[in-house]
Image (cartoon, rainbow, N blue to C red):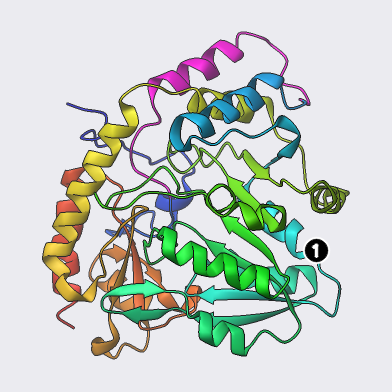
Amino acid sequence: MSDFDQLIDRRNSHSTKWEKYAGRDILPFWIADMDFAAPDFIRNALRERLEHPIIGYTRPPATITEAFQDWLRHHYGWSIPAEWIVWLPGVVPGMNMAARCLTAEQRLLIPTPVYYPFLEIADNAQRRDVRVPLILDGGVWRMDLERMQSQIGGVKMVMIANPQNPTGRAYTHTELAALADFIDRNDLILVSDEIHCNIILAKESEHLPIAQWQPDIANRTISLFAATKTYNIPGLGCAAAVIPDANLREQFQAQEAGLVSGIGPLNFVASEAAFNDKSNWLQGLLRQLRSNAAKLQALVGSRMTTVEATYLAWINIADLGLNDVQAHFESHGLGISDGAQFGHPDYIRFNFACPEMMLDQGLERLGHALQG
């Protein structure tokens, strides 16, 4: 049995994903954590750290910075200096810090649908946002740069997810070049959430860190990375902001005061072990996710656009005419994410990162739920 076949009982672990439906016959496919065990090399690193009896406040160790730099070189051939890196307790705090760099008059532009914390950022920072829908072009979700240009008034910052959550897009070099031109032409700052960068499923797709592939706008970028999604350690929050421009980096770091907590020592240990990974664990994960995505696609057909990246499917349910999306799927024994919270009520997001046995049971229920 591989790491990805094992059914793990998460009851009594205070799991956000599973406790939501405790005592009910509802399988959870909603929140983005996986039902796979974190790899042994991470758990062993945590055990070794726990041999020291004090779990105190911890500065970012030089070793995690070195591991992250090596990880960028290993996966993307991107060499960056250590001073570009700002360590954070998570990607979402980084997005909120970035928005606070805007003045009260400047606005934030967000292509939607998108991971729902993006849609809370403007209120959190007491700023205003502009939301521009992605367009579905020949079965592919794309940024609508023409419409973005038409709504550019007052905008100073654009915030994207790449890979895109919830649609599963991995933007191409051509798309990112067009976005870079838009950013440069309009004198904007780009914030790119790249947390799913290692989870590329489509054979023809790849992850392209925009600050690397579009160096002309590198000094306009805040790129956010973390190992927590790929290695299923989201409860040990740790993220890196890569900010090449010294002035923007200083402005970004100034937003931490009184708002952003430090990072715990176990969080550093887990992420450092992940960044140092040169095993075949990730390849095994991707094989399982590709198999799961294919099974899901076979069931739902054209309701679902191809998942190029992430372990999240974006499924069209507009024809069902549902008044209460969550209640409908729960009545069929499924916990899903309602697309309304991502900015598009005609869809659901379905997390397929689970062992095959659990997925098969979920797909049987999903088939019935999609019949109305």
The quarter of the displayed image where residue 336 is located: bottom left
Q: Position of residue 320 (x, y in %)?
A: 24, 87
Magenta span has 79? Answer: no
Q: Position of residue 173 (x, y in %)?
A: 43, 58
- With 301 as the anchor, is 90 left or right in this view? right
- With 235 as the anchor, is 372 left or right in this view? left
The amino acid at mark 1 is Arg
Q: Nearer the viewer, residue 205 or 357?
A: 205
Quadrant in which the N terminus appears? top left
Residue sitting at 72 percent across and 39 percent down? 84
Magenta span has 42? Answer: yes
Residue sitting at 67 percent across and 56 percent down? 221
Residue sitting at 27 percent across and 58 percent down? 25
Label 1, secondary structure: give it. loop
Residue 361: tell me if it is visible: no
Residue sitting at 20 percent across and 58 percent down? 362
- With 357 as the anchor, is 191 left or right in this view? right
Q: Nearer the viewer, residue 199 or 48?
A: 199
Residue at the disc numbered 1: 100
The quarter of the displayed image where residue 269 is located: top right
Q: Nearer the viewer, residue 193 or 75?
A: 75
The magenta segment: 33-58
**Taking 75 as reference, is 141 above or below it?**
below
**Taking 306 as reference, is 81 above or below it?**
above
Q: Position of residue 163 (x, y in %)?
A: 44, 56
